């Protein structure tokens, strides 16, 4: 079957609010030698997409200017150097951009098969979130069985994944969230306790929950306002892993003495600037350790809402409202 030269895609120009997103026609991408061309059936909506739409998170050199960091669909074409995949096979991919479209390319090393029994929407909900959680919580945060972790933003796509994976792999998870409903959802997913940050102080609550021992790891996406409290509730040899700065990155009058006294580590990362080699290593670890859990019905992605591609603006409005629990997805009509 011949492939179309043109495709439907979402434009985010000029930069601005959610309503700048609109459906247009554009040229179908061509896979490079190491890439797979995917006929997209579903794509995920993520916070970095919002930042890129605002003009605050430009794509890296050589990446598509279109939004979208994860997609699932079927293999439509293979680059000259790609082996191990066949046309028509179901595939999910961590994309370097371009997933808000009917076709997208991704390095073959960043592609994985759908877990058995998954739908396109479920498969597309995996890459950005699961890659990010694995890289930060386990590779950089070194979370181990028997340890404890506090996950801020526990009802977000990242949060629900972190709670489930931490619990499944033998750690004790605590979470913060912004409502009683969201806290209940976190506990249903496996959190030992969830703290409503609108009505309680997470530092006080964690000290009570851990008998003042603190937690071994904090996974934080809030940023500056939480940093002093994060350092206070980390146990000796604890690790603070920063994955976003939703409320700012600059902290005034921060006392770093706890870092020395408790031998703390402060680290963090973003996924998009990582090399294909680094992302390939994460993909292999996920396929080995997490895919069997998914196929056993554990640690499943939580889908909050699914919108047609043409309604991408509505999906971004929902993302910015923070009213969702879990992932927001786009599907192709």
Image: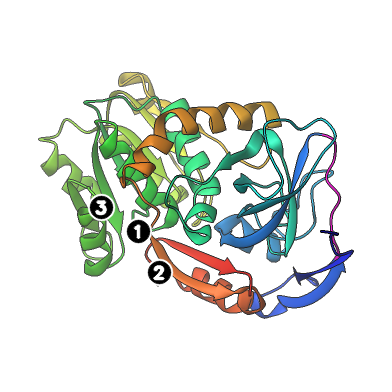
- Counting residues from the start of the chain, the first of labels 2 and 1 encountered is 1
Residue 147: quarter of image: top left
Distance Cα–Cα, label 2 vs label 1: 8 Å
- Counting residues from the start of the chain, the first of labels 1 and 3 encountered is 1
Instruction: Determine whether label 2 and label 3 are within 8 Å by CB.
Output: no
Q: Residues within 10 Å of mark 1 (few under 14, many from 20)?
A: many
The residue furthest front is 1
According to the picture, the residue beneath numbered tag 2 turns out to be 324
Instruction: Determine whether label 2 and label 1 are within 8 Å by CB.
Output: yes
Residue 210: % across, % down: 14, 36
Answer whether residue 287 is magenta in the image: no
Q: Which mark is residue 155?
A: 1
Distance Cα–Cα, label 1 vs label 3: 10 Å
In the displayed structure image, the side of residue 168 where residue 47 appears, left or right: right
Residue 308: quarter of image: bottom right
Residue 87: % across, % down: 72, 46
Q: Residues within 10 Å of mark 2 (few under 14, many from 20)?
A: some
Q: Quadrant of the N terminus?
A: bottom right
Q: Nearer the viewer, mark 1 or mark 3?
A: 3
Numbered disc 1: secondary structure: loop
Residue 268: % across, % down: 51, 35
Q: Which mark is residue 189?
A: 3
User: Is residue 298 at all visible to an observer of this figure?
Assistant: yes
Residue toward you, 327 or 253: 327
Q: Which mark is residue 107?
A: none
Distance Cα–Cα, label 2 vs label 3: 15 Å
Residue 299: % across, % down: 33, 46
The residue shown at (62%, 45%) is 94
Establish if 315 lies above or below 104: below
Numbered disc 3: secondary structure: loop
Answer whether residue 28 is magenta in the image: yes
Colour scheme in use: rainbow
């Amino acid at each position: 079957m011949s492939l179309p030269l043109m495709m439907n895609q979402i434009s985010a120009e000029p930069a601005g609010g959610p309503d700048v997103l609109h459906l247009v026609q554009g040229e179908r991408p061509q896979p490079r030698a190491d890439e797979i061309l995917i006929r997209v059936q579903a794509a995920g909506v993520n916070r970095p997409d919002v930042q890129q739409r605002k003009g605050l998170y430009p794509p890296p050199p050589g990446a598509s200017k279109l939004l979208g960091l994860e997609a699932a669909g079927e293999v439509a074409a293979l680059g000259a150097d790609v082996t191990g995949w066949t046309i028509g096979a179901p595939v999910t991919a961590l994309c370097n951009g371009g997933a808000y479209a009917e076709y997208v390319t991704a390095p073959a090393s960043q592609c994985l098969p759908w877990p058995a029994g998954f739908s396109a929407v479920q498969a597309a909900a995996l890459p950005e979130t699961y890659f990010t959680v694995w890289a930060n919580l386990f590779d950089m945060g070194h979370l181990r069985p028997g340890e404890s972790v506090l996950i801020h933003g526990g009802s977000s796509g990242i949060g629900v994944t972190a709670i489930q994976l931490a619990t499944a792999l033998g750690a004790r998870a605590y979470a913060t969230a912004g409502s009683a409903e969201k806290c209940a959802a976190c506990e249903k997913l496996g959190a030992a306790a969830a703290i409503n940050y609108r009505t309680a102080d997470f530092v006080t609550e964690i000290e009570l929950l851990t008998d003042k021992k603190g937690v071994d790891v904090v996974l934080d996406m809030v940023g500056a306002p939480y940093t002093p409290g994060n350092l206070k509730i980390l146990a000796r040899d604890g690790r603070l892993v920063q994955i976003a700065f939703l409320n700012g990155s600059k902290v005034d009058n921060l006392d770093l003495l706890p870092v020395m006294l408790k031998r703390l580590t402060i680290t963090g990362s973003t996924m998009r600037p990582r090399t294909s080699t680094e992302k390939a290593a994460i993909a292999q670890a996920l396929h080995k350790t997490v895919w069997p859990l998914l196929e056993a019905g554990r640690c499943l992605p939580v889908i909050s809402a699914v919108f047609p591609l043409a309604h991408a603006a509505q999906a971004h409005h929902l993302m910015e409202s923070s009213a969702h629990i879990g992932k927001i997805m786009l599907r192709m009509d």
